[in-house]
Amino acid sequence: MAVQPLNADLIKNSKLKFNEDVIAKIAGMAIRDIDGILSMNGNVFDNIADKIRSKEDITKGIDVDVGEKQTALDLEIILEYGKDAHQVFENILHEVSSAIESMTGLKVIETNVYISDVMTKKEWQQQNKNNDNNRVN
């Protein structure tokens, strides 16, 4: 059976919408391997919730506003000591906007990155080890 072309009225009258959590998850996945980011930070409630969960929330530290054609993001990160904050920022802008725009068609019009802490990798690993020992599974 041949695929029928879509009716122009159907396309004109239909909308594709995205939940803010979907955009936050795409952003979280896009930046998880960027060199210089040790962690995404959330608010106090996120940190409390992480202590009782066994998996880290990939959307922690990401706030999103989604419109019909555009989106804006606020990200809170822990920067690795010795890394160039401006280069990390540019990498975030590139990776996040590319992933969101290619997957959703939404234009990323603003990305604000807040660096809440700076740590060495060793300090960060020790802090996570201490948090894991306090975590309830």
Image (spheres, grey):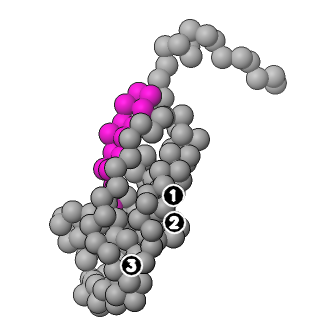
From what the image shows, is residue 137 above or below residue 18? Answer: below
Residue 21 in the image, given as x and y percentages of width and height: 37, 48
The amino acid type found where label 2 is placed reads Ile
- Residue underneath mark 1: 91
User: Mark 1 or 2 closer to N-term?
Assistant: 2
Mark 1 touching mark 2, by CB under 8 A?
yes
Residue 47 in the image, given as x and y percentages of width and height: 23, 70
The residue shown at (38%, 46%) is 111
Q: CA distance from mark 1 to mark 2?
A: 7 Å
Element at label 2: loop
The residue shown at (30%, 86%) is 127
Nearer the observer, disc 3 or disc 2?
3
Residue 62 inside the magenta-drawn segment: yes
The amino acid type found where label 1 is placed reads Asn
Residue 21 in view here? no
Magenta segment: 60-75
- Residue underneath mark 2: 34
Q: Is residue 83 left or right of residue 54?
A: right
Residue 115 in the image, given as x and y percentages of width and height: 31, 64
From what the image shows, is residue 117 above or below residue 11? Answer: below
From what the image shows, is residue 113 above or below residue 45? Answer: above
Depth check, front residue: 83 or 49: 83
User: Mark 3 or 2 closer to N-term?
Assistant: 2
Element at label 3: loop
The residue shown at (20%, 72%) is 48
The residue shown at (18%, 64%) is 45
Residue 81's label in the rendered image is 3
Nearer the observer, disc 1 or disc 2?
1
The amino acid type found where label 3 is placed reads Tyr
